[in-house]
Image (cartoon, rainbow, N blue to C red):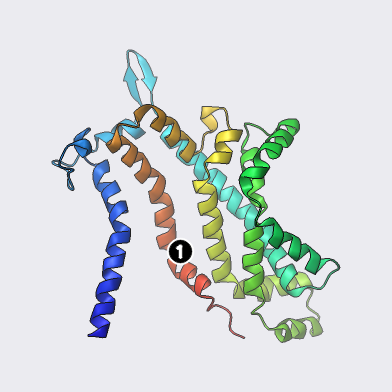
Amino acid sequence: MRTIVSTAAAALITALTIAPLAYMVVVSFMPRGESTTLPTPLWPSRWSLENYHELLVRRQFDGAWFDYRIVPALVNSIGVAAVSTALGLLLTVPAGYAFAKLRFRGRERGLQLLIASLVVPGQVAMLPLFLIFKELGLVNSYAGVILPSLAGIFAILFVRQATLAIPDEMLDAARIDGASEARIFRSIVLPLLTPIVVTLALFLFLGSWNDFLWPLIVLADQHLYTLPVAVAAIAREHAADGELMMAAAVVTTMPVLLLFLALQRYYLTGLLGGSIKG
């Protein structure tokens, strides 16, 4: 009986969690204006692709071509998120390992500084950061969007905490056998940290993909817009078109949802911390 109640409770919580996402998808297929009728429909009177057609397909009005530039923004977001993730992993994983297992002067003080900096809201640094980037000529460029995301303090601490579970004896044995620190990191540490690295990659990709405020500040050319900025620009003119905006939300959400489903095995293993056994 207890198992049945627990299963029913888990199913109810899952249904409540998924319901908004499912309704977003359903509304995106409704004919224009149907979602605002009373009583609020829970199912389309007819399934329609007109919202996706208007959002994604280039059309001709009065002899001129027009589109919302969602597809180019989608490509921009994929490129920015992929580069941010790759560079973020390249910098934060070795840094997390160094703070966990290497002995060097100022390590404890540096770690304390990193932890203390976590309490500073990122918005506080945006104005001075923008002024610095303006002087460097990085405003309205992808470099200006990507560089701030590389300062992944949470990522360094995340990797450090996972690396602490690796036995020191294993690394010391490799050093006695003559392995260099680079080889120890590449051949021993990285394979053990695979679920952690994949989980971190997912976090970094999601963080870059969902980032709205900083790209909105840095990017002025609409040809460089990332997806959240492009969707926000559409929302300013079509806030009342719920079906169109839900279609835009589906286009924004689905790539990362598919990525999560593809990597969920590593993601769950990484979060549960079961990848490293001493």
What residue do we see at 50% from left, 53% from top?
A: 206
What residue do we see at 52% from left, 71% from top?
A: 270
Q: How many marks?
A: 1
Q: Quadrant of residue 219?
A: top right
Disc 1 packing (10 Å; few <14; some 14–19; many ≥20)? some
Report x, y in % for residue 71.
42, 36
- Element marked by disc 1: helix
Report x, y in % for residue 167.
68, 83
What residue do we see at 64% from left, 72% from top?
A: 161
Which residue is at the front of the view, 176 or 102?
A: 102
Residue at the far top: name it: 62
What residue do we see at 47% from left, 40% from top?
A: 228
Q: In this view, does 205 lie to the left or right of 119?
A: left
From the image, which quarter does the N terminus lie in?
bottom left
Does 80 appear above or below 267?
above
Q: In this view, does 203 lie to the left or right of 65?
A: right
Report x, y in % for residue 187.
67, 74
Residue at the far right: name it: 105
Report x, y in % for residue 82.
55, 50
Q: Which amino acid does label 1 sit on?
A: Leu
Does 73 appear above or below 250?
above
Residue at the far left: name it: 45
User: Which residue corresponds to mark 1?
Assistant: 263
